[in-house]
Amino acid sequence: EDGIRDQPRSRGLGDVYKRQNVSAGAVTIGNTGAVSARMIINTASNGTNLSVAGTVNAVNTGSTVSIVVVDDDSATLDTVTFANTVGNASQVIDNIVISSATSAGNAIFSAAVGGGAAVPNITVTGGDVAAETSSITLNDSATFTAMTLQENTGQVTATIDGATVVITGDIQGGDAGEGNVIINATAATFASNGGIGNSTSVRSIVIGSANNATATIFN
């Protein structure tokens, strides 16, 4: 914990703004008595990729817990990599938000997301200019209710990568025909309550490539 905190913008909401790598065994998000508690990682001021090394979990405080990844610098888009698990079965992380309506955001989740407790909302939004493309990459299994690929002017891509990956949740467009889904995992399984475009269609689904074979099962 580097203690970086934007006091004027927090105003009792429990927001912690990170602008550098986070290296800790565990990161716990929560704020007793607050309406919301957010861990906001902004890569704009660094001009470099960032990483979160430890597990990221919520604490039971009664507040809505969110992880927000944003890049305010459209000239150079950087990525935040979560190296360890995000969420666990006992405490739900309510929202994972990649970017905003005016700024891009790019995140890689190297380990499992959800941990058995579904993240209710994962939202990936394109920025307000074409160059502000946003993305999420899942390199391990993920449990969520809905992942929404919400395009503005910038496009949005969700990539399923890694070895054996199970996706429990629906990947959907913000509006019909928004968002690209790429499946490059060696073996990807979409559970019975998961899928792509069940609620709202996406623009494209690409499974494998000329150099990367993949087996994908939709239950």
Image (tube, rainbow, N blue to C red):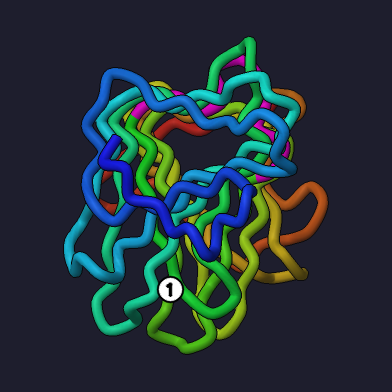
Task: List x then y, in percent, for residue 214.
Answer: 38, 36
Q: Is residue 139 above or below residue 55?
A: below
Q: Are there few (<14), some (14-19), or many (20+) residues within 10 Å of tag 1? A: many
Q: Residue at x 63, y 11 (%)?
A: 90
Q: Along the line of sight, which residue is nearer the eye, 194 or 150?
A: 150
Q: Amino acid at mark 1?
A: Thr
Give the quadrant of the C terminus: top right
Report the predominant secondary structure element of the magenta stretch: loop
Count the numbered circles shown: 1
Q: Along the line of sight, which residue is nearer the eye, 209 or 179?
A: 179
Q: Residue at x 42, y 39 (%)?
A: 138
Q: Is residue 195 magenta?
A: no
Q: Residue at x 40, y 46 (%)?
A: 137
Q: Is residue 56 above or below residue 35?
A: above
**Residue 60 vs residue 200: left or right?**
left
Task: List x then y, in percent, for residue 12.
Answer: 63, 48
Q: Residue at x 79, y 47 (%)?
A: 198
Range shown magenta: 111-121
**Residue 160 vs residue 83: left or right?**
right
Q: Is residue 119 magenta?
A: yes
Q: Is residue 11 above or below residue 84?
A: below
Task: List x then y, in percent, for residue 217.
Answer: 57, 29
Give the quadrant of the N terminus: top left
Does any portion of residue 166 appear in the rendered image? no
Assign a secondary structure to mark 1. Answer: loop
Does any portion of residue 186 appear in the rendered image? yes
* Quarter location, residue 201: bottom right
The residue under label 1 is: 133
